[in-house]
Amino acid sequence: MTKIIQDYDFRYTLGRKLSNIVMRLYHREIWVSGTENIPKNTPVVFGPNHQNALIDALALIYAVPGQPVFLARADIFQKGFLRWAFRGMKILPVYRIRDGKDNLANNDGVFDEAKGVLVDKKFLALFPEASHNPLRRLLPLKKGIPRIVFLTEQDHNFELGTVVVPVGIYYSDTDHFDETLQIQFGKPIPVGQFKELFDKNPQKAHIALRDAMAEGMRPLMIDIRDKEYYEMYELLRYLYNRPMRQRLGLKHRKQPDRFRADKAIIKMIDDHTKDNPELKEEINTKTSRINEILARHHMEPREFYPSVKKILAPLRAITGILLFPFFAYGGLNHIFPIFIGIYVSKKIPDPQFISSIKFGVGLFLTPLFYIIQFFVFQAFMHNWRISLAYLVSLPVSFILFKHSRRYYKTTQKLRKTHILRRRYSPEWDEIGSLTDELKEILNKMSLRQ
């Protein structure tokens, strides 16, 4: 009997457990909220935003119970091994016109499998934007989810009770490891509420569901809609996050509070510049100049405007110096997986796959190098107890490496800041003046909220 994709698979469970362990090691922190919005014993389709290639799927697997089935673009299934591997991960290919007109007919079988997942009241997931996006903004949603859910409900007289759950995924940085990941689940959207409209005009029902999904996703993600002023919003998120948290009464700098402050900053700027383009251009001129200076000195806004209080930065730097032996030991013992990940990621034409490549290298090569290093160590030591102790120390050394690296990075940031302040004092003073002017503008906006 042919095994259907929604059937329980112990290999998926084992792979998920390993993946979740690596996810926790790969990210600095993972925040999950809104899981109470996921119905039980109900056909559910998850619709997350798409910023980070395969890591987005692993993030959803980390946060969702059970064994969700994914639909992904077909071009990543080109090689036989990948088709086999993705099938084992419960990922089905969806063909687009760019994959060739002859391949579009293959979608019929894929959609039949997807319908079977919902009929069995299992979880289905696909990215409604249909393409990953490096910017923090929601792309126009495609027709994939509406097509599948309406076909399924239509076949069962709209009695299945299928819902679409919007999902927001946020990364503090998509290219590097030891960054923050936040996953939020929104209120479920019952497909049945569009039945009357679907009976009258299926196309309008598709559009209505798509609009409802977009409205459900936007509050769960950083959505900078104004592409022309994108860099302006990005810099202001870092510059004004702490003052905004204080104004909102958010006492912590943890990611949920930082996210709320970011959303408030973006909305505040949108509201106050909607009918005042001159003010928006004035703000943009100031932020563009700050970005220009920072880029010249190889600094990013989040380095110059850290989330920690400035008084704590020197203490973190001193801690980084004290922890340097742990940083060096952990780094040396993981130098091959780290540099292989960096080397391979540089060969990838699509930068959105960088994090996925690094994650994959860590997932598969790190255990392999642990075994190799163990036997090499034993060949020199000729003592199994010491060699086993060394083997046990390797994953511990990575955790210590990861934590000490944070403090070391603070030291690097302080060094860059010190160079800018001492050697390029006019530019340092200019950034300080522009920052004060921007804060004054934003303070006035917040008082009028």
Image (cartoon, rainbow, N blue to C red):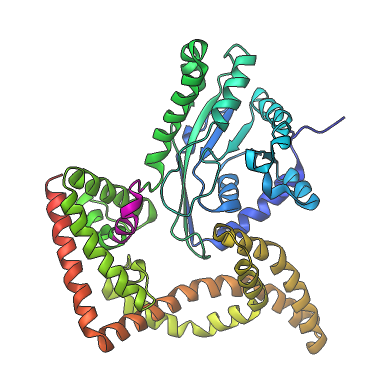
Left or right placement of residue 285 versus residue 333 in this view: left
Question: In which quadrant of the rendered view does residue 437 lie?
Answer: bottom left
Location of residue 331 with respect to 446 vertically, above or below: below
Residue 183 lies, in percent from the top left, at 48, 47
Q: Nearer the viewer, residue 276 or 221?
A: 276
Residue drawn at (43%, 43%), measured in percent from left and top? 138
Location of residue 48 with respect to 311 vertically, above or below: above
Is residue 41 in view? no
Is residue 211 in view? yes
Residue drawn at (55%, 61%), measured in percent from left and top? 351
Residue drawn at (45%, 85%), measured in percent from left and top? 322
Left or right placement of residue 298 versus residue 94 in this view: left
Q: Which residues are magenta?
A: 224-235
Question: In which quadrant of the rendered view does residue 234 lie?
Answer: bottom left
Residue 68 lies, in percent from the top left, at 64, 38
The reply to whether the magenta stretch includes residue 373 is: no
The reply to whether the magenta stretch includes residue 226 is: yes
Classified by dominant secondary structure, the portion drawn in magenta counts as: helix
Left or right placement of residue 418 versus residue 84 in this view: left
Location of residue 275 with respect to 309 vertically, above or below: above
